[in-house]
Image: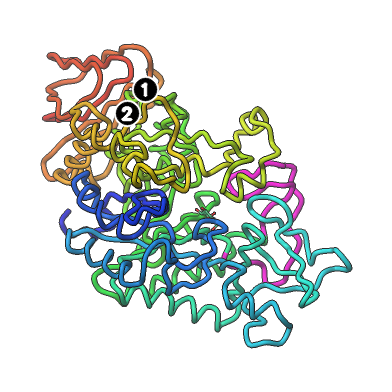
Amino acid sequence: MSQLPWWKTTAIYQIYPRSYNDSNSDGIGDIPGIIAKLDYIRDLGFETIWVSPFFASPQGDWGYDVSGYREIAPEYGTLSDAEQLIEEVHQRGMKVLFDLVLNHTSDQHPWFIESSVSKNNPKSDWYIWRDGKGPGRPPNNWKALPGGSGWHYHPARDQWYYASFLPFQPDLNWRNPAVKQEMFRIAKFWLDKGVDGFRLDIFHVIYKDAEFRDNPFHWSYLPKDDEVGFFTEWKYTINQPETVRLAEELRLQLDQFSPVRIMLGEIFGEDSQIKKYLGDGHNRMHLMFLWDLMDFQFSAKYFWKVLNKYETTYPQPYTPVLVLGNHDSRRWIDRIGGDIQKAKLLVLLQLTARGVPVVYYGEEIGLPEGQIAARESLDPIGQRYAWAPNWLLKALNLYVNRDNCRTPMVWDSSAQGGFTQSNVQPWLPLSAHPKIANAADEDQDPDSLLNWYKSLLRLKREFPAINNASLKLYPPELARKGILGYSRQSDGWNFIILINFSSKQVVIPQNTIAELLTTGYVETTAGKITLGKYSGGIFTVSSI
Ligand code: BGC
């Protein structure tokens, strides 16, 4: 096991820099604020951090609209702060991933400003420009991922540019070798500074069809798996073969660096498509988000199907990425009614199944959703859908106001939760629940969610079997009774993990078993184990 590369056995903690820790009392989290919390993250048990973008940006999409890839947005700090972050992470024996937005820039990026002034300037071909089909008629039917046409008219060129996401995020033209070369140089710039890899933002949309063919009609109005939606199949705008090749080219660049540097891809598509980006497990993406846990239904049957898929579709050498939430999705604690006991079961699964867990800041304290109305949101997606009544969004299961999953981290019980000074207004209000959990109080409480994370992460580090050993699922009959069960074995250790996702007590015949770590009501007696409602744990067995 010790030979495995670090990225196969690590646990990743995602930081949204604006919301994590404000070191200079301007109401905005920053890089020195992150550095001040590295000990907290290490002591929790995470070995890797992924930091959402902090590069120069007009902050139209809070950093996912970059206007300078080698510069740091002043509200987050300086270049030397970013260098210090890398250094301080390494001093603690940890790793750090930066967030690289390769598909698009901000429309305020000097490249786009130059590109948009005329059809024949040095940057004129750096973005995807096309003539329309006629006055007011875009070049083809390509839609943007969040809805609406992806084409936007620009009078200075009397042409349209394409944006896969929002209008102020024009897509770069990766078919232009100069663009590709520059983006590789940017990656190298940070790799030279010692960053351990990148989370790659909407990587699947980087190349579009070279012939600009119309996407075929599809009945689905709502986006589904980012493969169809808004009445089109996204055949020519996502997951093009050139994008898969790009993963391979980037891998070659990363492989030139030592120690190992990695890519964690954000890609949407069917598993067969995701597998293409992973290649043979050694030649393309190292890790890719798998979204099944994020879309969870709270049932053993659901999780059985997910793990079964991971073990059959992504067996070793592939390493599934186990993610429950991020800065684009409703806080999952709210999806289970804020129930800490149920939360512990989800975490037990996330930290003991085979794969690399990615935990979004605040999940460790059960930080709930904010209460910000869409019409007051700062998130451009929230603003865009501010007209939509809540009942409609709920019925369609759409999450549009991402402000609510980005509220400040709550460190203590002071007025602004220790995120910033008590008399300072944070950029977003704290989640306004009657009693919000906070890291300091939870640290003192042995039964807290925070300490549950800590204990599980400690076991994951201590026992390779719980980390990257193969996983054997119990038969589906058990899941039908409400229990998810699987075993992990290596180095002479046999562990079983049993999780009762049901509201009923269940008794299972099981021989020679010892409790390693449990939650809820669990009783082991000769020949059987009793699991009370919403309980579970890790057990050791002498034979399976
Ligand atoms: C990021 C979002 C961002 C979008 C455009 C995503 O998938 O996670 O936060 O708005 O890409 O860059």
Residue placed farthest to the front in the image?
Answer: 423
The answer to whether residue 156 shows anywhere in this view is yes
| Quadrant of the drawing holding the C terminus | top left
Q: Is residue 176 magenta?
A: no
Question: Which of the two residues, 319 or 65, is positioned nearer the viewer here?
Answer: 65
Is 387 in front, or is 201? 387
In the rendered structure, are the residues bearing label 1 and label 2 in contact, judged by CB atoms less than 8 Å apart? yes
Whole-percent x, y for residue 456 in the image = 22, 37
Q: Is mark 2 within 8 Å of ligand 1?
A: no
Whether 480 is drawn above or below 369: the answer is above
Residue 166, percent from left and from top: 64, 57
Q: In this rendered view, identify the residue nearer to me: 38 or 431.
A: 431
311 vs 267, left or right, is left
- The circle drawn on residue 501 is 1
* Residue beneath disc 2: 345
Q: Position of residue 495 (x, y in %)?
A: 19, 34
Tell me how many marks there are: 2
- Is 212 magenta? The answer is yes
Please, what secondary structure does the residue beneath circle 2 have? Answer: helix
Q: Secondary structure at mark 1?
A: loop
Residue at screen point 50% across, 42% down? 329
Per the picture, the main secondary structure of the magenta-coloured stretch is loop
Give the quadrant of residue 419: top left
- Which residues fall within the magenta stretch? 206-235
Q: Relative to 315, is 285 above or below?
A: below
Mark 1 or 2: in front is 2
Colour pattern: rainbow
Amino acid residing under circle 2: Leu
Q: Is residue 133 left or right of residue 397?
A: right
